[in-house]
Image: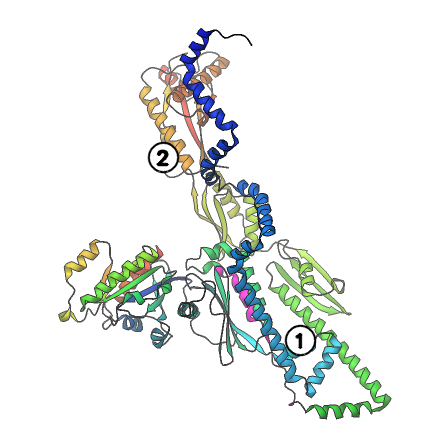
Amino acid sequence: MRPIDPRLEQLRNLLVGREIEVLSRLRKVLEDPEQLAIAVGRVLPAAVAQVSSDARLGEVLAPTLEKATQSSIRSDPRTLLNILYPLIVPAIRKSIGETIDETFQSLNESLKHSLTWRGLKWRWEAWRTGVSFAEVVLKHTLVYQVEHVFLIHRHTGLLISHVAAANAVGQDPQLVSSMLVAIQDFVRDSFSGADQQGLDTARLGDLLLWSEPGPFAMLVAVIRGNPPEGLHETLRDVLSRIHDERRHALESFDGDSSGFADLEANLRECVALGQRAQISAKRGFPWFVALVGLVLLALGGLGGWRWWQNEQAWEHAQQLEAGKRRTWDGYVAQLRAEPGIVITEAEQRDGKFVISGLRDPLAIDPQLLLHQAGIDPTSVASLWKSYQGLEPTFVLVRLQRSLDPPPSVTLEVEGDRIVARGSAASTWIDRARVAGRRLPAGGPSLDLSHVHDINEGAIGKLSEAIQSHEIHFNFNQSLPTVGQDAILDQLAKELTDLESLASRLRLTARVMLTGHSDDAGNGTFNLSLSLARAEAVRALLKKRGVDPDLLAVRGAGQLEPLETASSEAARSANRRVSFKVGIEEQQ
Amino acid sequence: MTATLQKKICMLGAFSVGKTSLVKRFVESVFSETYLTTVGVKIDKKTVDLSDLTVSLILWDLAGEDDISSLRMSYLRGSAGYVLVADGTRPSTLEVAMSLRRRVETDFGPLPFVLLLNKNDLREEWAVRDEEVQDLQQSGWWVRSTSARTGEGVDDAFGTLAERVVR
């Protein structure tokens, strides 16, 4: 190593001694893992808070958290169990309770009917169709009808939607739903239940009230008769489907139920549920009578046995056929209720089901429903022709695809209209207006009255103010005529205001500075002179603190004159820089 | 007609200020008054026509309490506004109304409300001083004097409240 000149060292100490000290302190922190950990630890919470809205943080941390959870479970599962306990236990308890109820219900019914003639008949049916005896008993004995279904907003107790069976009577549903919520509150308060728990079953004579709670809305069914426990599951499915489809609307519900008309179809599904009473047979014989009957039957001889067998086989085939027919009718009814599907023909021909009609490409796939209904697709011949439906939901999807609305605009179906809300550039609004006019008559219309033009309001005024300015130049000069400092100061202030206002409104502003020349002299020279003028004004504005990224420049030469006369006054007016503001949505 | 826009409104007031009589004469009611003493609340409905829309006020008539600590606050959850009722002939009920309002404000924040000074028809027994009412009005309260007996001021009061919860 070369010896260092002590004078140089002294000079260095004099000039940057303090910085060297700071640097060595920082270096010590960086190189000592312990100190570095303390330093990072001090800012870590603030740093995480800063980026907590960034989705990437979650993605980056997820694998680590998963590993941490796994190792926590491995080392001591009790910790996690204690955390989850209050959530899991009520759910398990409820599920076990319902299963036990269901088992008891079927056991009860089985016992009640096992030693009667009817019971033997059902046992026969169970053996023939391959389902359990208990299920056959339930099928014949559980007679019930869902009379009312209420969808109630949990927070306010206000009614969102209500459907009643055709023959059902009841009071004003809006009042009833609030009273139901009040009574639930009352039970919860009086017997201090947990917040998520409430009254889920109430019985009055043969009228039964079942309530299924969801995150934002609850479904209350008023049932007459003796429903199977499995109906809970059906109601829960409908409720969770409603939440999946309309979560945001339910969360922000403020009493206006007009946007929820489409939910009636879901509720109607529940109201349609029921098991009609069978034509009741005579009261069951005692079991020994049945036994004697069986013995007599056994003695009936071969001919009688054959006849009996044929009869049974025929009846079996008939019943299978009737079962298939019922499934098919259910499928057709379900399909008919789907929007965008028009059935023109549905019948049974030569042992095959034939269905044909029109289908909007956005409607549900009939083949998929076929699977869900449990019908063998090879036994069905389908013929669907495409058409374009005018259902508001379909028109909405089409509009969303063709208009490609900016993130600040939402489109929603409201009654028979599609309403756009938010703010957008005027170009988009114009495009949307044209698309709205082209919508076929008779279908939903597009309501754009709630979309604000981003060029209006404060930002519009500011843009107009900026555009009203001009900077003037002397003949053949690229620097502005003296005495325009006040205008430039004013411009700089307005441009700074514009930028901060735009960023507050999440908009991007661009200002085009266009330089112009008079018509004296060579066109090419004028073009570069005009560009130089625009550049000069940009430099002057930059000097006054305007962000240069906001400003774009171009030269128009003599091609865009303000005045076309050939007087000196006109030429002087044409030697200028003009301003044009453009506002766009931030991407 | 059933309006599609509904708002939950609570009716609060001291014991026997005429709250239930107000409700009984001027709104649609299907439940009996025994609900008030059993469940502590009764639901009624008042349909109000505003200039451009119809709104159903779903009224939660809470049982009158002189001791406000026993009020079931959970019934107020999700309210868009509330009606305070006091008896113009008994200044102590105005005190109760004021403390009810403080209680609601503490638990649920500021909500639109209107104060009804009831029993306006008993003018000779009127005991609430005009200055007191003016003081309340100056501090932003909407005060209406009403009579459940003659109906004076009732529709106007519900209309005002509906206007304020909708806008």
Q: Is residue A278 magenta?
A: yes
Name the residue tied to disc 1. Answer: A135
Do we see residue A468 in this rendering?
A: yes
SS state under label 1 = helix
Quadrant into which the N terminus of chain A falls:
top right
Residue A273, horizontal then vertical, whole percent: 58, 72
Amino acid on which the number 1 mark rests in the picture = Glu
Position in image of residue A443 (x %, y %): 53, 55
The segment highlighted magenta reads A260-283
Q: Is residue A447 magenta?
A: no
Is B160 situated above or below B25? above
Task: Say yes or no: labels 2 and 1 on the same chain.
Answer: yes
Tell us which disc is closer to us: 2 or 1: 1
Residue bearing mark 2: A461
Q: Residue at x 32, y 19 (%)?
A: A485
Outermost residue on the right side: it is: A302
**In the rendered image, which quarter is residue B82 located in?**
bottom left
Query: Left or right: A65 with respect to A287?
Result: left
Query: How many dots with numbers?
Result: 2
What's the CA distance linking mark 2 and mark 1? 75 Å
- Seen in the image, is A279 located left or right of residue A180? right
Which element type, helix, strand or loop, lies under badge 2? helix
Question: What amino acid does circle 2 point to?
Answer: Lys
In the rendered structure, are the residues bearing label 2 and label 1 in contact, judged by CB atoms less than 8 Å apart? no
Residue A362 coordinates in the image, percent (x, y)? 62, 53
Task: Name the foreground residue: A148 vs A90.
Answer: A90
Nearest the viewer among B22 and A564 is B22
**Residue A398 or A19: which is nearer the viewer?**
A19
Note whether A247 is above or below A111 in the view shown: above
Image position, residue A452 (x, y; %): 42, 43
Q: For this rendering, which residue is in front, B79 or A91?
A: A91
